[in-house]
Image: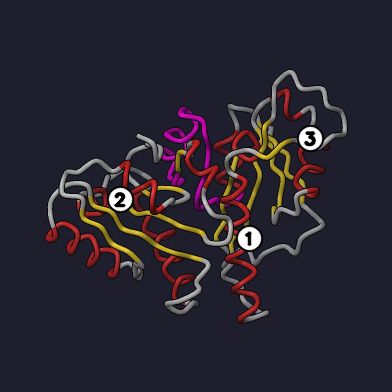
Amino acid sequence: MVSTILNTDVKQKDADIAVVVAVTSRALFECEADDDGGDDVYGVGLAFPLLKALHRVNERLLEQNPAESLLFDVILITTDSQQQQQSSRIISSTRHYGLDVGRFCFASEEDFIESLLKNNVQLFLTTDRNEAPQASQNGVLSVMLDQQIASCPSEQLRVMFCGDAIIRPDAGPSQQASQSFSSQLGEMRRRFGMLDTPLSIILVTSCGGRESCGSALRTLRSHGVSVDEAYSLAGSPRGPILSLLRPHFLLSDRFIGLDE
């Protein structure tokens, strides 16, 4: 069974235009299974800076145009049965930290795909290696989060595209969803100037040389995406440059974290 609760503390987004992003409560909060903390709020988890960055993008868009509808609409999904018994604590924790979460969705592990589809989720963020491929197989763009994002900046959303996946795209069910999300992200980025932007798009190609990087750039531009930074690693390890760029997540055709 799937249960959805609206967050009356935040203004609801335009469902036909907003970019719906779902994040699991396990990624957002430090929810221990045996925690009996009563009404106390949860500690923040590794996805906390990411949600703050999404909120910052929304704030800046609305500062420029109070009637803006192309915004991130965040849903918090809980699939753990023990966490669902503390639903009021999850909701109060979200409100305590002032997070821009529009809806709280409680679903069983068997029904969480239904919750994503019913809410028209366009990007699913999780730390669970089983949930990400399941969602992708059902046509929902999914991203694995890892410990590195806990130290990412919260004042700017930094999204990295894997150029190798763009050149040789996966023909799986989520490919169309990936292109749609990329186009919306590109449209958001065009709302801001070159300097002092709350949204930065980065391209990195691990294999090949400048030609591969150029091909990936042209493909992204055909989807309406212009990048702020582009790097061709030509087979070099990805770790050193990631530690400098500090992206919040990687859009790829494989469910890998930034530290892999």
Q: Amino acid at mark 2?
A: Cys
Of labels 3 and 1, earlier in sequence is 1
Residue 19 belongs to magenta span: no
Residue hosting label 1: 55
Q: Is the Cβ of the residue at disc 3 closer than 8 Å to that at disc 1?
A: no
Which of the two marks, 2 or 3, is nearer to us in this view?
2
In the rendered image, the quadrant that contains the C terminus is: top left
Disc 1: CA contacts within 10 A as few (<14), some (14-19) or many (>=20): many
Q: Position of residue 20 (x, y in %)?
A: 57, 56
Q: Is residue 170 above or below residue 54?
A: above
Horizontal relation, residue 56 to residue 167: left or right: right
Residue drawn at 28 percent across, 69 percent down: 222
Q: Quadrant of residue 150?
A: top right
Q: Secondary structure at mark 1?
A: helix
Q: Are marks 2 and 3 in contact (CB under 8 Å)?
A: no
Q: What residue does disc 3 label? A: 87
Q: What x and y, as percent, mark residue 106?
A: 70, 36
Measure the C-alpha gap from mark 2 to mark 1. Answer: 24 Å
Quadrant into which the N terminus falls = top right
Instruction: Kindly report the distance in space between the C-alpha atoms of the residues bearing marks 2 and 3.
Output: 36 Å
Q: Secondary structure at mark 2?
A: strand
Locate residue 204: give its quadrant: bottom left
Range of residues picked out in magenta: 119-142
Amino acid under label 3?
Answer: Ser
Q: Indicate which disc residue 168 carries.
A: none
Residue 122 inside the magenta-drawn segment:
yes
Q: Report which residue position mark 2 lands on.
A: 162
**Which tag is nearer the camera, tag 3 or tag 1?**
1
- Neighbor class of circle 3 (other Cα within 10 Å; few <14, some 14-19, many 20+) is some
- Front residue of 94/172: it is 94
Question: Residue 239 appears at what percent x and percent y?
Answer: 32, 41
> Looking at the picture, which amino acid does disc 1 mark?
His
